[in-house]
Image (cartoon, helix red, strand yellow):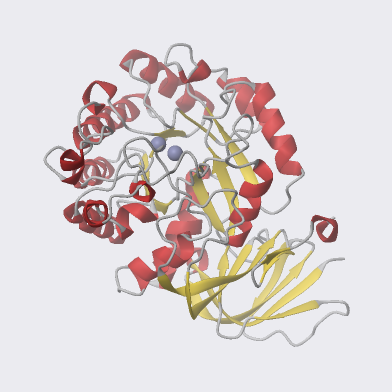
């Protein structure tokens, strides 16, 4: 029997409204006891001293790209899962823009088989909305649900035909599959990223704020009329946040996520340093938008923090802002950047941060995680909230395209526990043989 006792840590569990010193006893992957102090320790129990550390339900990242199958020079299921573990992330949802596109049972099975061989984090595949992400023929939702997808999403683009999107939502509502939505009206996407803003000065093409806002509004209206469970990906504009706020007030079944880069960086950073590490889609917006993201996180309009972890090779992510690809990695820096930007500044409490990184994402997925109550699965992140360090480029991800290299942060993930087993400790991933 596999026994683990985490002692003297500060338990932060939004599901039980606990923020105090507790011991946590785990047996065969299940939380068995949560007490102020556990003194009767069964023989053979591995002890973990978590003095001064936060003990939190493992983070759940609703939005990552692992590039596998097909683009494995950027990332693989194996390296992506290791990056997750190093970031305290115990469940990831992988987006379907693989090669081939994750739009059928065979590709989902291939991903799940690879995930089975990478026991560092739980992986839940997201399938595309339409075959080949072509926006025409809706995928076989029932078959995909059967094989284990957690949601569908056309991430990277929107389904432009409103009729097809409405039909997809209608089927999702019927089968109770969440739909994750990258909001980008392609007819408005051309031109400049931020009309009248820094990106226009630089002449960068991309997702205009109109393109994001208009599509956010359409998707919410369609979700209201079909009853689908809609989740808006990577919100970046103040208008989008306001539309979601109003929709929630009207009782629409909508949730939303924001990436750390959209509350930690703004287009002022590109102006200061025109570098491709600041190039992503949606792009960095104005300081005013950044403030709006923080307000929306604090008031609950934005439910979750998700990284949109998007690995690229060094060749694809050169200093050349014009020609480099969109996207940055985020799994290994998400906790530290979120804590620095939101908690150390008093915008969110530690409890609210854990809510955004674990408890709410679990609720959005409808899975019994994001909690450390007795009987729940022992997916845990132990972090030292006061440890100060500078983020370097030594990532478990294959990629290094992070704008946060060189940032001084306070808060380091010390240990990640998956199903009661330590998969990451003091900077090192546990060898696979030792996990078998
Ligand atoms: Zn996207
Ligand atoms: Zn994405």
- The residue nearer to you, when weighing 1 against 373, is 1
Q: Quadrant of residue 347?
A: bottom left
Residue at the extreme top: 136
Q: Is residue 406 found left or right of 345 in the rendered image?
A: right
The residue sitting at 20% across, 45% down in the picture is: 242
Residue at the extreme left: 196
Q: In the rendered view, tell whether residue 418 sits above or below residue 204.
A: below
The residue sitting at 70% across, 42% down in the picture is: 115
Q: Is residue 36 found left or right of 157 in the rendered image?
A: right
The residue sitting at 22% across, 40% down in the picture is: 243
Q: Quadrant of residue 222?
A: top left
- The residue nearer to you, when weighing 242 against 289, is 289
- The residue nearer to you, when weighing 341 against 409, is 409
What is the quadrant of the C terminus in the image? bottom right
Residue 368 seen in the current view: no
Q: Could you tell me residue 160's position as x and y percent?
A: 33, 19
Q: Could you tell me residue 390's position as x and y percent?
A: 46, 72
The residue sitting at 27% across, 59% down in the picture is: 294
What is the quadrant of the N terminus in the image? bottom right
Q: Is residue 39 found left or right of 192 in the rendered image?
A: right
Residue 46 seen in the current view: yes
Q: In the rendered view, tell whether residue 198 sits above or below residue 273.
A: above
Q: Could you tell me residue 103's position as x and y percent?
A: 57, 22
């Amino acid at each position: 029997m596999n026994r683990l006792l985490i002692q003297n840590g500060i338990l932060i569990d939004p599901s039980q409204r606990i923020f105090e010193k507790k011991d946590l006893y785990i047996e065969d992957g299940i939380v068995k006891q949560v007490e102020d102090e556990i003194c009767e320790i069964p023989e053979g129990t591995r002890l973990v001293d978590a003095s001064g550390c936060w003990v939190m339900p493992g983070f759940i990242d609703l939005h990552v790209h692992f590039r596998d199958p097909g683009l494995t020079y950027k990332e693989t299921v194996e390296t992506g899962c290791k990056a997750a573990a190093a970031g305290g992330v115990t469940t990831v949802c992988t987006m379907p823009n693989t090669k081939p596109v994750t739009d059928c049972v065979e590709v989902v099975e291939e991903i799940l088989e690879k995930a089975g061989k990478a026991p560092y984090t739980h992986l839940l595949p997201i399938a595309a909305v339409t075959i080949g992400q072509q926006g025409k023929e809706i995928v076989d939702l029932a078959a995909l649900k059967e094989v284990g997808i957690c949601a569908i999403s056309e991430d990277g683009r929107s389904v432009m035909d409103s009729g097809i999107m409405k039909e997809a939502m209608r089927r999702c509502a019927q089968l109770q599959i969440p739909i994750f939505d990258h909001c980008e009206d392609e007819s408005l996407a051309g031109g400049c990223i931020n009309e009248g803003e820094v990106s226009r000065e630089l002449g960068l093409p991309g997702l205009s704020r109109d393109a994001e806002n208009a599509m956010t509004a359409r998707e919410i209206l369609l979700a209201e009329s079909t009853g689908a469970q809609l989740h808006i990906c990577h919100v970046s504009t103040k208008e989008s946040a306001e539309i979601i706020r109003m929709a929630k007030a009207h009782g629409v079944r909508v949730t939303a996520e924001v990436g750390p880069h959209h509350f930690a960086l703004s287009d002022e950073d590109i102006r200061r340093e025109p570098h491709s590490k600041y190039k992503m889609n949606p792009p960095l917006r104005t300081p005013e938008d950044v403030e709006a993201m923080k307000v929306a996180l604090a008031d609950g309009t934005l439910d979750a923090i998700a990284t949109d972890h998007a690995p690229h090779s060094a060749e694809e992510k050169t200093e050349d802002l014009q020609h480099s690809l969109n996207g940055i990695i985020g799994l290994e820096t998400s906790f530290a950047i979120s804590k620095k930007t939101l908690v150390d500044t008093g915008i969110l409490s530690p409890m609210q941060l854990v809510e955004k990184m674990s408890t709410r994402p679990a609720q959005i997925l409808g899975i019994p995680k994001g909690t450390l109550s007795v009987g729940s699965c022992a997916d845990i992140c132990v972090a030292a909230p006061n440890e100060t360090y500078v983020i370097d480029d030594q990532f478990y991800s294959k990629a290094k395209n992070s704008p946060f290299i060189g940032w001084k942060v306070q808060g380091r993930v010390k240990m990640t526990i998956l199903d009661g087993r330590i998969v990451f400790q003091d900077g090192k991933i546990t060898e696979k043989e030792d996990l078998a």
